[in-house]
Amino acid sequence: MEQDEFFLKVSRALSGCQMVEMELKLYLAHAVALIKKRLGDRMPFGMSGDDFQNHSLERLITEFKKFSDNQELVKRLNKFKDERNFLSHKAIASCIDAHNGYQEWQAASLDERLLKIEKEASELFLAIHNDSTRFLGYLWFENEA
């Protein structure tokens, strides 16, 4: 696999990872907005979606577990987190040799793994969104508390 092609595949997989993180942040922001809406003036509620903006994927998953009972999705997210961490911290480094530069054979060995990460990211993005549909209608269309 050519070096440019390898970096493009890594970029596509990483962008999928970022989409998962973004969808988790949206889910959490919508969840706390619904709680705030339901509480109304009954008690102060100082959380907002901004509270999650700088969280790592691992921390987003920890927070997500507090708002969703979809254990299968949580399990998939935790497995995905490990792959995302490999991609972010080791994938490129494993294909660059300090003395010989880009290692085409090593990059080629990661091809299937990169495609799986990209595919799983796309599926997780949709699964998170679908999980949020259980409550988004209440957030958008229900009258104030």
Image: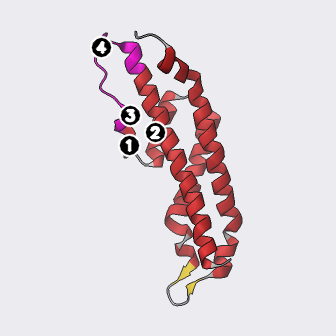
Separation of marks 2 and 4 at Cα, in angstroms:
24 Å
Asked if residue 106 is positioned above or below residue 139 in the image, the reply reads below
Q: Position of residue 136 (x, y in %)?
A: 53, 23
Within 10 Å of disc 2 (Cα), the crowding (few <14, some 14-19, many 20+) is: many
Q: Are marks 3 and 1 in contact (CB under 8 Å)?
A: yes
Residue highlighted by disc 2: 25
Separation of marks 2 and 3 at Cα, in angstroms:
7 Å
Q: Amino acid at mark 1?
A: Gln
Sequence-wise first label, 3 or 4: 4
Q: Amino acid at mark 4?
A: Met
Separation of marks 2 and 1 at Cα, in angstroms:
7 Å
Check if residue 109 falls in the magenta segment.
no
Q: Are marks 2 and 1 in contact (CB under 8 Å)?
A: yes
Segment colored magenta: 35-51
Q: Are marks 2 and 3 in contact (CB under 8 Å)?
A: yes
Q: Amino acid at mark 2?
A: Lys
Numbered tag placed on residue 53 in the rendering: 1
